[in-house]
Structure formats: C-alpha cells, structure tokens
Amino acid sequence: MTAALVPAERTVTPLGIDWVGWQNWLGEHIDPAWRPGEWNQDFWLFTGDLNSPRTTAVGCGTPHCRAILSSRGRCHSCTRAQEKSGLTWEEFEAQFVPSARPRGSDPALCEVVRDSVRCGRVSVGVTLCKGHYNKWRRHCREHGRRLPIAEWVDAFSIEPFPQPPECSVGGCPNRRISEKSPICNYHQRRWLEAGHKGTANTPQLRRWAAEQPPLLTAAQFSLVQLPSPLRQELAHGIQQRDELDSTMQPFAMRAIVSAALTTATTSLLLAADTLKKSMRTTDEKSVLRQLTWSVHQGYIAFSGHDLRGEDHFDPRAAGLKGATRSGRRKQFGSVDLTVIPQPWLRQVLKRRAEAEKPTGLAFRRWLRACVIAGHGMNRLPGGGIDSTTLDFAHMQAAFDEIAASVDKDGRLYGAGYRGDLWTAFCQTIDFGRLADLLDAPGSFMRRPSQRIPDEDTNEDELGKAVPEHVIRQLDVQLPSLGTGVTYGAMDPAHVRAMFQTAYVVLRDSGRRPLEVVSLPRNCLERERDEVSLIWNNHKRRRMRRRLPITSSTVAAIEKWQALRDSLPEAPSVSEPYLFPAITSAGGSDHLMSNNFSVGMRTWVDNLETLNSDAMDAEGNVIPFDRSLIYPYAFRHSFAQRHADAGTPIDVLREPHGPRRSKNDHGLLPGLTGTQAQGGQNTQPDGHRPARNRDTLLVDRLRTAVGGRAVRRLHRTDQRQSRRTRMPDPLPVLRLRVLPS
Ligand SMILES: [Zn+2]
Ligand SMILES: [Zn+2]
Ligand SMILES: [Zn+2]
C-alpha cells in the first residue's frame, strides 16, 4: 500500500490522521476468507445468499420470479399482476412466466452452427453476433434478397467463432464481445454511456474495467468503485457486523455506496455526517451508524485516539446495556454531547454514565435532563459555562426549565416524567461533586422547594402557603424588590416597578407564576362597578379567563400600565404583554417566570429580617425559612385565604368540563378527602361536639362538594389572622377560577 492511494487533499488534516498507517491497519483487519460464497475480496463484491438467515435478502414468493426483496413477500410487479388478473395466488403461480433474462445479462448465443459447433459469441439485437451479422448483411445486399441463416452458413462456408473469455470486469458473468475486446456488451454500453469514445482495447478501457462493478442483483453490492480508505473501512465495517450479531443488508449497503459516490466521501472518519444526511430508510441509517461506529472503534484500536473528541459519548463502548430483555444493544453510534451547552455538564454526564452503566433508556433520560437543564442555565448571563460561577440562580433556572418542559407538540410533559428528569439532573450534579468533577460553589444546590408535584391535579396540595404574617413583612419591604436587577436596557426604576406590580398581582390573584408574567397588556375588564383580571390558563389551554379583583390590585395594575405605555425600551415582540421581555431574542415574548423567580429569590434572600411567628426556648423569634418563599407559594396562600374566608370550594374551582379527575375534591390546597373521613361532626357514640369555626367551615365545604368529606385545615395555617384586604366579600360568589 502506498501513499498514492490516499486522496491527495486528505493527506494532511487538522486531525493529524496517519492515513498510510490507517490503511495498513485496515488491510490487516479485513479477512479475505470472510463469509465464503458471499464475500469476494478480489472483486470487493458481496453476493447475498438468499437462503442465509444472516443476510437480509430473499427471493419473491412467486416461484421462478427473479425479484429479490428485503423481507418475505411478493414483489411489486407480481402483486400488481395478480391483482389485475383476478386469479388466486395458486392459479397465478401456475401460469407465471418469468422474464427471459435479467436485464443487462447476456442474451442467447449467435445462431451460426456448423458441423454441430455453435458460434461462441453473443447475439446482438438480432440472432447473430456482430461479426456474423455484418457479413450476412453484405451477402444479402449482394444477392438482393434476405438469405435464410442456415442456407447462408452452408453456401458461404461460414465458420463459427470460438467462445470468447469472460468479461474482464470482476464478477461479471457475461462473455466478452470478442477475443479482442476486454469487456462484454453490457459493460461496453456502460463505457459509452460514461462519455467515452471508441471501443478499441486500450489501456484506458482496461483500467476503467478494473474499477467497475458487475451488473448487480438486488442481493449484491460492490465496494470496488469507492476510493481508499473508504473501501477498506466499509469492508472492515461489514465484517464487524457478524461480531455484533447483525445481519448483512445488501439493500442498505447499496444505498450507502451510492451516497458515498455522489457525496465524494473518502473516509467514514471524516465525512460521516454528509453521508448520514443522504440516508433515507431506518435500515440505511442504522447500518451506516454501525459502520461508522465500527470504523471509529477500529481507529481507536489503531491509534489510541477517539477522533470524535471529548464531547462524544459512545454507549456501546462504555458497556451500556440495551433496553431489550437480552440486554443486547441494538443501537450503534456515539451520542453528540454538544447538545448540552455547558462542557462541564457534558463531562459529568459522560463520567457518570461510564461509572454507573445505566440502560440505554435511562441514559437517554439523563441526557434529556441535562440538555433541558443546560438550556435553562444557558439563559442566564454567562450561560453557566464556567462551573466555578454556578449558584442558586442556575439551579433555579435548571429547575424552571425542566418543570416547564414540553414535548414536540408543545404539551407539558407528564409530572412523573418531569420529576424523573429533575431527579436525573440532580443526581448527575451529585455524582459530579462526589467524583470531584465539579468545582461549583455550595450555593449551586437544589432546594426543598424545587420539587415537581407527583400529579398535575395535585400540584396545589404540595408546597406550603406563605403565611399571612410573612406576607405582611414582605409587603412592608416591597419597595426594594427589583433592586439591582439588570433587565436589558430598562431603567432600574422601571424594573423595580415591574417586579413589584408582578408581585402584587401574584399575591392578590392566586394565578400561577406563568399566568402572571404573561398577562395581556389590557388585562383589566370593567363591567358595571366590577373589575376583572383577564388571564390565560396556559396549562389547560383556556384563554381569556376572568377573575374579579379588588380595587387595590386594580390600582397597582393601572399605575404600571401607565408607566408601561411610556416605556421606550420595551422590545416590540412584547407589545401585547403587560410585562415586557428583556429582548426580542430571548425566546419569550414577555417577562419570563424564571427571571421573576430569580428576582424574587434575590430580594427575599437579601431582606434584613424575616421572622416566623415561633419563638425558641430563650424567647427569641425564630427567623422564617426563606427558601419557602417562591412565586408558586403565593398561589397556596391565596387558596388558603379563601378557605379561611369560607369561600365554597366549587366556586373557587374552575369548571373542569368532562375531565373530572379523582382529585376533584382535593382541588383546594390543603383540602383532601382522606383525612376528613367522618370528620369531627359525629363521634362514634353519636355525640356531636361543640360546633366551632372549623366545623362550620367543614360543613360549608362539605355542602359545596355535594356531601363529600373534606379535611380540616391545618391548625397552624388557619390560626393566621386574615389579611384585612383580601378577599373582600365582593367577588366571592363570582369566583370560579381556583385552582384549575
Ligand atoms: Zn415476483
Ligand atoms: Zn456468431
Ligand atoms: Zn461485463
């Protein structure tokens, strides 16, 4: 093997591949005796054995039909003909006449016979070989009539030609046209079709013939036309299929060879991506993945280097098990980890997979979790690329992104799946810390509040309300919310006003954070003396819902609306929204829940004091756990407030239509059916305890839910004195919105 075989433009590459060495290695790792009867190393030709279970090629179900299929059945033309004939398959098979010969194969021999010796050349068009035909025509012209062949042979003592040798194209079963020509009729046609002139036996023609495949059946493929080292790479790759327990797929191989020729691919080490794009069927894609995989494995064995780089993960080489019962991996190929924006996260994921060897299915989930979380962190300034700068905001961004992750149709993933993703991400981070792969600060840590509820319908039962006395402390310190938050080009005073308005709406309306940040610009609707908040329930896809709100909330919104109208720096995509986005290019047209939640977290964490209503043994007030304050918690507070006020549960709930879930009775946070069985109305002895405020509420709720039992409220929660402003008696009976 010499360097001349190597494509010139590839001899020096940025990857520093030793092409000559690589080809030598391949040469030593191709077995010329592989699959005798099917593989012909001299011609680089594979001829599938139609009876072999290791080759995916079978004959058409109609006996004598020449069609070859990739799976059992009838060929297209048989199916069509049988349908048209109206015959049963049995009748059809009985009358089936196969085509005379495969296209491109030699027709019958020349008709000239003398002394029982037949001319050995192949007839062209008519029934004579070319030499005899020309002679016969001349004689016919001279005699002025068409001479019958037998008569002509006798009259002119015509000698039959000896049989010429086989066509010089490797594997071609046809005869040469004559002793003088190196090729058969079929290949001569190909030679002329390729734009060559003349059919003389020149060195050029012989060189061309040496690189031609024979006329291929559907069960065959040839690598002879491919450049080196691609030809050797494919030969090595297909031989590896046996080791990997995969069948040979001549159909897919033909597609790969033909795509390699059109894309001028010279090596799978370099151009597998362009080739991959030309693949159409799943079989083609999967065979190419395996070939590429095997070639890369070979290259690693040859050079000790993986050209796919650090950001690739090879599940099979890492020993991951397939999801099948046998544990045999069906998929080949490496996973491109650059879909994760942060290089440190790619490495942690890769090392974890190598260490824990999950199933392919589990690995896909880990990868998905890291991709989604990575994109969440990537929205923050710096993108979370530098692991030493990670902090709470990144963890929150990762959580928010996973909590809001949707499928390709834009539907929220099931809570169970999102929960799995979140767990997978957190465990990956934990692994990174334990394995000393991650030098992130301690503030980059999940918080107890970052939990994805088990069931969508149960979300309101989980998580705790922010107690009203804490809300009062927050209200007092509200003017500092939004301080220090950079928000695109927006003036700091405007940023504060926006965050504070969003807080007021969140606190007073009990809408979900996303519903608040995506409020329409004209979100107030007046009817007589009542004002409603117009909001969109993204979760259940119910748009333009109405919620009566109090005058203080209305005032806060109106104040912001006036300011909003004068904002010069709001991006145009945010035109329809009350709270504008940072830029037009951020992926969201309005303020993102994540930005709001980070702003709130910063604010709460920096408050001077925030006390609980409990005292320690020495009589000191215990500080309130600030991690319990996050946007969603205000929705719980809102629901709690209404429960305390005795708002009937069914007017709090948004009608579900026909989709009533098993948790209907639990739709009000803190109220589930289980604990209320029997309640406290009736003791076993039939004695009715003194009615207090709690039992009255339970009774009222019970009436409201049609006699179903409801749980008493937590004493700690219900003992909170009520907010004076909320909920005013005003809208109670018209409320029919929470929680949906
Ligand atoms: Zn057929
Ligand atoms: Zn002849
Ligand atoms: Zn030929």
Image: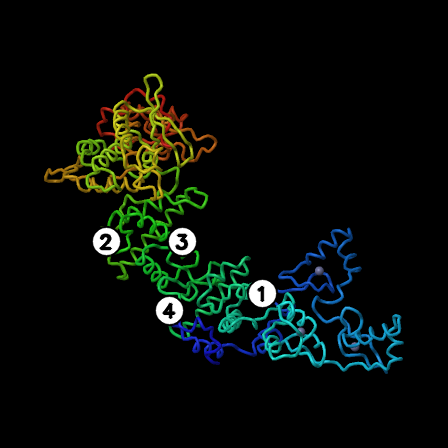
User: Looking at the image, is mark 2 or mark 3 earlier in the sequence?
Assistant: 3
Residue 483 placement (x, y as % from top left): 19, 39
Dot label at residue 389:
2
Cα separation between marks 1 and 3: 35 Å
Cα separation between marks 4 and 1: 31 Å
- Residue placed furthest toward the left: 618
Check disc 3 and report its element: helix, strand or loop: helix
Q: For the residues labelled 4 and 2, say whether their Cβ atoms are less than 8 Å apart.
A: no
Q: Amino acid at mark 3?
A: Arg
Dot label at residue 365:
3
Check disc 4 and report its element: helix, strand or loop: loop
Q: 10 Å neighbourhood of mark 2: few (<14), some, or many (≥20)?
A: some
Look at discs 1 and 3 and give the one toward the viewer: 1
Q: Which residue is mark 4?
A: 14
Quadrant in which the C terminus appears = top left
User: Looking at the image, is mark 4 or mark 1 earlier in the sequence?
Assistant: 4
Q: Which residue is mark 1?
A: 254
Quarter of the rendering containing residue 739: top left
Residue name at image x 77 percent, y 57 percent: 92
